[in-house]
Amino acid sequence: MSAAHTFSLIQLIGLWTQLGATALLVGLFVVMRRYSPRRTYFSTWGEAWGALCAAVGAIVVETLYQMAPPALVAETGGVDSPVIRSLLGLSAFGRLLFLALLVAGTAMYTRGFNHARFFRIVTPLAALWSALAVGGGEGTAHIMRWLAAPAVAAYVACAWFLVTLPTGRAGLGTRLTGAVFASHAMLWVAYAAAYGAFPFIHPTPGSFWAELATYHGYVDLLALMLLGFGMMVIQLEDARREVDDARAELSVTNDRLRRMALYDPLTGCLNRRAYDEGIGLEFAKSTFGTVVMLDMDNLKWVNDQYGHAVGDELLAYFAGVLREQIRPLDRLYRWGGDEFLLVMPGAKVDGVAGRLAAVIEAAPPLALSPAHGGEHVPLALSLGAESYSSADQLPQTIERADATMYADKRLRKRTMTPANIPTVR
């Protein structure tokens, strides 16, 4: 096998490997795109890998053509035939589109860049640049020298976009991919040197630069795999942020739903379910205390006289008055209907009922709207207070307080006279 064919075989193996890896990346981007429909930058990066796959495919065909029997090559126009030039032009154009799409995708990710106008300008420029690169007639060396400048500019721009991200947006993926973009820029400077772009560097046979020109397909393979990996990490980081946002929003929604389940929406008090789940009772269960059952005496009368809307207003007003007078560690529950439970940790039963009755008696009446004559409805209630000494006594203490409250209600009904019936004032 001649040296030329050996060189072509080495390049072909590298190109085939690069083509397979690039095609795999394209497939991976297509699959991942299904799970990130709103990330247009990721789609643009996927299109970039598609353009590179087409470019590598064209150069693979061109290399296979050059390895064909000399008679066949001669019959079809030789190594400088229009077919070869077309394949080289397609490869150069695909690589330039790859670079443009990388810049567009990275700018979209970092700056919210709109790439529509960008491509209207870049696409014809890429076609012209690839035609000039192929038109020199010097083969791969001439094309690589022409591609080096836009490649270095594109990779430097992408690296700059990523490394200048604010700290809050920067992550492992952006730092890694920014570093890979920077390494690609340096790599293309080395390619330019290896293909004779700098007059002070002479790539003699056996030198580092000559070896780099021979094996640059393998170097490209490693560099491109790192770049694809970095892009995947960025996409996964974005997906993780979306999941974290969704989890936080779900947590807020769950908290809101839990609050709706544990609080009475009318009065803002904890409800009976909250008591059953022990909400607000942590301190109450660790010490002695007093429980008070309260029942409004005139709610039915208000509902019958003015309607349930005014009755609801009276309930909310009563709960507000009571909350203003109790301690922060006390817990008020709407027990059901017009009944309320008040748990007072560390409080002695002596005087509790009297103090609460005095608070309610001193509270100003509820002022009704002009639609109801602007009348005033006083607060009237019966209550019962009982003490407990340990947490396991709470259920029985509540039952006793409930019985005491009903006894107070019966007594109030027996002692009511036309002068003290709780009506409007």
Image (tube, rainbow, N blue to C red):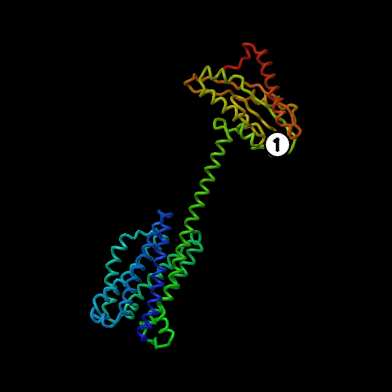
Q: Quadrant of the N terminus?
A: bottom left
In the image, 380 versus 419, the foreground residue is 380
In the image, 152 versus 31, the foreground residue is 31
The location of residue 288, given as percent across then percent down, is: 75, 34
Residue shown at the point (32%, 69%) measured from the top left = 94
Q: What is the tally of numbered marks visible in this picture?
A: 1
Q: Is residue 424 visible?
A: no
The location of residue 217, given as percent across then percent down, is: 40, 76
Which amino acid does the dot numbered 1 rest on?
Answer: Ala
Q: Quadrant of the C terminus?
A: top right
Q: Is residue 276 visible?
A: yes
Residue corresponding to mark 1: 284
Q: Quadrant of residue 133?
A: bottom left
Label 1 Cα neighbours within 10 Å, binned few <14 / some 14-19 / many ≥20: many
Q: Is residue 3 left or right of residue 288?
A: left
Q: Is residue 373 left or right of residue 408?
A: left
Circle 1 sits in a helix, a strand or a loop, which is it? helix
Residue furthest top in the image: 418
| Above or below 255: residue 219 | below
Q: Quadrant of residue 334?
A: top right
The location of residue 201, given as percent across then percent down, is: 39, 86
The location of residue 376, given as percent across then percent down, is: 55, 20
Residue shown at the point (70%, 33%) measured from the top left = 344
Residue shown at the point (31%, 70%) measured from the top left = 93
Residue shown at the point (63%, 29%) measured from the top left = 322
| Above or below 108: residue 75 | below
| Above or below 105: residue 304 | above
